[in-house]
């Protein structure tokens, strides 16, 4: 059975470089590995802790985490908070002779990372670890999230992303949400090989027709159904237990998730956005000048 593993990695870049090849680099670095029909994709937050969305974008799609424990500091604390709120329950803690495991265990108590397995082996030994992640939803309608895009001479607009559900097919027409524009998939590549289709869980490169690069942004969706963005998100707000009471007040807040980072204003259970956003199920709440910066999440009442 083909496996498409998607990992989030923090504090372990040298470890990752030994098991995967660098593919795409921006504020997030994407590494990849292919063994037969099985693929591994690893997101690394290259600009974190300076840029909080480097973390939130890197962790969003992951099914398992690889966490280095060389520095037990405030940045690791924010990784723990993001992992808790996104409910990233599967992962590994890279530990060694210099790891203060008693301090680490105290820090991780009552967090999702408390259940992560401690790994002390060599990097290549990690590849044999069992996988229990889910590679998207093969039965649903086609849905593709875009993380990078650019113009290629003689090809046109190229978008990189992941098939979240269904199957992406060559010559398929899809809506580019939230713009609602119709786009056609001219061609598909997986691991630099041209293919006719790509199943759920696949990382793809798509040549797109009827779409210009300036019409794309990180978090754009290619979907069978046209969806409208909204300028207001209403729902249940859940604050992380580590967040002090003053940070829980109404006021300016950024929504992070689904590869988006947008400003709004929180008032009770409603967030009024500066510009429209796709009404997804959950978004993290971020106050970029606070400590910690990630304070909670909102569960959209329309889901």
Image (tube, rainbow, N blue to C red):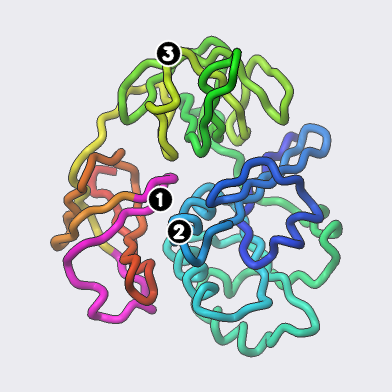
Which image quarter is the N terminus in? top right
- Please determine whether, in this image, residue 100 is positioned above or below residue 80: below
Q: Earlier in the sequence, mark 1 or mark 3?
A: 3
Task: Residue at 61% x, 49% y: name it.
Answer: 29
Q: Residues within 10 Å of mark 2 (few under 14, many from 20)?
A: many
Disc 2 designates what residue?
Answer: 86
Label 1 and label 3: CA atoms lie apart by 27 Å
Q: CA distance from mark 1 to mark 2?
A: 9 Å
**Furthest residue in direction top, as rendered:** 171
Location of residue 158 by image quarter: top right
The disc placed on residue 210 is 3
Residue in the picture at 22% in, 53% down: 264
Classify mark 1: residues with Cα within 10 Å, few (<14), some (14-19) or many (20+): many
Q: CA distance from mark 2 to mark 3?
A: 35 Å
Determine whether, in the image, residue 271 is placed left or right of residue 89.
Answer: left
Secondary element at image label 2: loop
Considering only vertical position in the picture, is 259 above or below 36?
below
Judging depth in this view, the residue of 171 and 207 nearest the camera is: 207
Question: Is residue 9 one of those drawn in magenta?
Answer: no
Residue for badge 1: 257
């Amino acid at each position: 059975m083909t496996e498409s593993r998607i990992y989030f990695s923090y504090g372990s870049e040298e470890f990752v470089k030994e098991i995967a090849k660098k593919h795409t680099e921006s504020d997030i670095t994407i590494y990849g590995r292919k063994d037969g029909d099985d693929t591994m994709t690893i997101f690394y937050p290259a600009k974190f802790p300076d840029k909080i969305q480097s973390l939130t974008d890197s962790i969003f799609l992951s099914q398992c985490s690889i966490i280095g424990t060389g520095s037990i500091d405030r940045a690791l604390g924010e990784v723990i908070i993001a992992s808790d709120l996104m409910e990233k329950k599967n992962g590994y803690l890279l530990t060694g002779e210099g790891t203060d495991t008693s301090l680490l265990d105290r820090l991780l108590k009552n967090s999702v990372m408390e259940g992560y397995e401690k790994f002390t082996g060599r990097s290549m030994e990690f590849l044999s670890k069992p996988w229990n992640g889910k590679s998207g939803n093969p039965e649903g309608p086609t849905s593709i999230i875009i993380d990078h895009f650019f113009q290629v001479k003689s090809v046109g607009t190229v978008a990189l992303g992941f098939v979240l559900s269904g199957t992406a097919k060559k010559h398929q027409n899809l809506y580019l949400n939230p713009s609602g524009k119709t786009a056609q998939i001219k061609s598909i590549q997986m691991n630099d090989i041209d293919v006719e289709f790509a199943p759920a869980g696949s990382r793809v490169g798509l040549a797109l027709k009827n779409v210009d690069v300036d019409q794309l942004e990180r978090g754009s969706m290619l979907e069978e159904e046209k969806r409208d963005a909204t300028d207001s998100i209403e729902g249940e707000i859940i604050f992380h237990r580590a967040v002090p009471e003053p940070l829980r007040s109404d006021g300016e807040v950024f929504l992070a998730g689904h590869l988006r980072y947008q400003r709004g204003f929180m008032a009770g259970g409603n967030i009024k956005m500066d510009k429209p956003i796709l009404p997804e199920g959950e978004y993290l709440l971020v106050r970029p000048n606070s400590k910690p910066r990630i304070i909670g999440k909102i569960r959209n009442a329309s889901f």
